[in-house]
Amino acid sequence: METQTLNALAVEERAADILLSVRQTGVAIDDLPLELQPKTLAESYAIQNAVARRLGPICGWKVGPAKDGQEAQGGPIPSQGYRSTGFLCPPVVTTRFEVEFALKMGKDLPPRTTPYTAADIKPAIASGHIAFELLSDRFKDKTKVAALTRLADGISNVGISVGDEIPNWQSLDLTKLEIVLKTNGEITKKVETGSAAEPVMESMAWLANHVAKYFGGLKAGDVILTGARIGPLPIAKGDVLEAIANGVAKVQVKRGDV
């Protein structure tokens, strides 16, 4: 049993080495070597956690509502990838983006014997925000890479840009949250769609339990991305993107030239 545990740790660290190298160099790979590809959710999260711990402090998380009867899935966002609105995207590495509804924690949710439920989550949230998630193409063709491997890689996340607070978000129908996307000053997308409050809170409860198990729990100030409202879409060199929620809350990013 001890040998099996040591072997598993060796696989996790070797896989983490490769994924970290791709993040640092910006040179995409075809896939992880076959012997390092995760075969289970547990193996996928073990690799993801190994990468996260080596990237340093965590500023937040991304989580998507459960689909087709499966549990929610998520991943950590390293502090090195966090910026306030208007920051300059790193060239080359950031190639795609999503517009998201983000939640900022107001209280810690530490490990406990009783699992967190959706009812526990809402009182612990300080605010709702408009945000960009920045994505990186770390695989040459992600459609040819297994979902468990993409999960191990943090589901392509490379950073977030968090914008204004959305007023009275608790009382809004989140399925009708109006978001306008402008690219270089021109409106390129407008949506009024997305997950409702109930599945968002259910996925937040899953995340609270997941983070409590592996990282000591969600912390006040953590930013949680709750799923794409627009995208993923490409961002070209020099593009200035602005997203506006309900006509008042704004977030902006610019991708710099090489």
Image: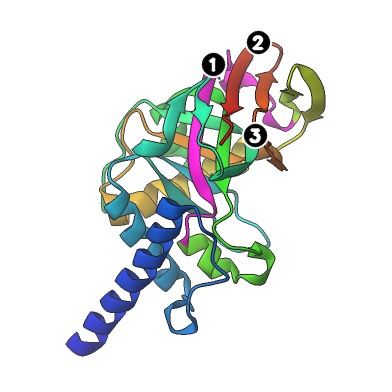
Q: Which mark is residue 134?
A: none
Residue 170 is covered by the magenta coloring: yes
Q: Which residue is mark 3?
A: 237
Q: Which region shows up in magenta?
A: 153-175
Nearer to us: label 3 or label 2 = 3
User: From mark 3 to mark 2, how far is it between C-alphas?
Assistant: 27 Å
Residue 229 in picture, x, y percent from top left: 69, 36
**Which secondary structure, mark 1?**
strand
Q: Which mark is residue 248?
A: 2
Residue 249 versus residue 23: which sits nearer the camera? 23
**Point 66% across, 23% down: residue:** 240
Looking at the image, the residue that sits furthest to the top is 248
241 sits to left or right of 215: right
Q: Which residue is mark 1?
A: 164
Mark 1 vs mark 2: which is more N-terminal? 1
Residue 152 in picture, x, y percent from top left: 46, 63
At label 3, the amino acid type is Lys
CB atoms of marks 1 and 2 within 8 Å:
yes
Give neighbour class at mark 3: few <14, some 14-19, many 20+ (Cα, 10 Å).
some
Mark 1 vs mark 3: which is more N-terminal? 1
CB atoms of marks 3 and 2 within 8 Å:
no
At label 1, the amino acid type is Asp
User: From mark 1 to mark 3, how far is it between C-alphas?
Assistant: 24 Å
Mark 3 vs mark 2: which is more N-terminal? 3
Residue 215 seen by the camera = yes
